[in-house]
Image (tube, grey):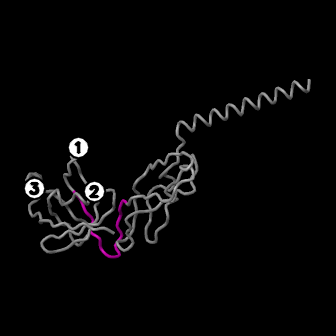
Amino acid sequence: MQSVAITGTARTVLGKKAVKATRAKGLIPCNIYGGEKNIHFSAHVNDFKSLIYTPDFKLAEITIDGSKHNVIVKEIQSHPVTDAIMHIDFVELIPNKTVKAEIPLRLVGQSVGAKTGGAVMQKMRHAKVKTTPESLVDALEVDITELELGDSARIRDIKPVDGVTVLNEPSSPVVSIEVPRALRSLKADEEKEAAEAADAATAAAAATAE
């Protein structure tokens, strides 16, 4: 699993004024929870880019005053207008201690329905899981090979991983193979023609019987 190295500076003065001053320097105020004590630190906004602006799930190794902390992102607060990162909370990974995380969902295989013109529509891109650091994975797989037109795969169809418990509702849809409008129209025309042919055959049979 990929890990991003970040060097931070401990924040010894807390409060709104201190946070505002930190941001004015181009630094992001952060917290680390889950260890023996909560840790407050800051680091330059550029240091987080490869960790935050990516679809991949990554760990972070944060060094503060010579002490290293293996963490995962818990929550990111962004500016409501500019989307600039305002604050990041991390959870420290402690051996054998349960953590919750959001893991990317990866589609594998080529759908039968897609081969006949269906559109693969991924409705959920992350799943909430409970696990330990030893069992963390960078993605959970959903096999779509057998999905035909109109079929869906749900949370319960995620490939199981030892030590990882998925917390989402099992019936929640992850991906569906949708029928494009052109195919729907073609199918409707074919059904209409078949119905008309059946009606004509019935009428002909009735006329013959008379």
In percent of width and height, residue 15 lies at 11, 55
User: What's under tag 1, amino acid-wise?
Assistant: Pro
Query: Which residue is nearer to you in this view: 208 or 162?
Result: 208
- Residue matched to label 3: 22
Where is 203 relative to 92, above or below? above
Q: Is residue 184 visible?
A: yes
In percent of width and height, residue 191 lies at 67, 35
| 3D distance between C-alphas at marks 3 and 2 | 19 Å
**Which type of secondary structure does the marked residue at label 1 adopt?**
loop
Residue lying at the far right of the rendered structure: 210
Residue 186 quadrant: top right
**Which type of secondary structure does the marked residue at label 3 adopt?**
helix
Is residue 91 inside the magenta stretch? yes
Q: Is residue 156 visible?
A: no
**Which type of secondary structure does the marked residue at label 2 adopt?**
strand
Is residue 117 inside the magenta stretch? no
Residue for point 33% across, 56% down: 55
Residue for point 49% across, 66% down: 160
User: What's under tag 3, amino acid-wise?
Assistant: Thr
User: What's under tag 2, amino acid-wise?
Assistant: Glu
Apparent side of residue 136 relative to residue 116 in the rendered image (left or right): left
Q: What's drawn in magenta, residue-wise?
A: 88-102
Image quadrant where one finds the C terminus = top right
Image quadrant where one finds the N terminus = bottom left
In primary-sequence order, the first of circles 1 and 3 is: 3
In primary-sequence order, the first of circles 3 and 2 is: 3
- Residue matched to label 2: 75
| 3D distance between C-alphas at marks 1 and 3 | 19 Å
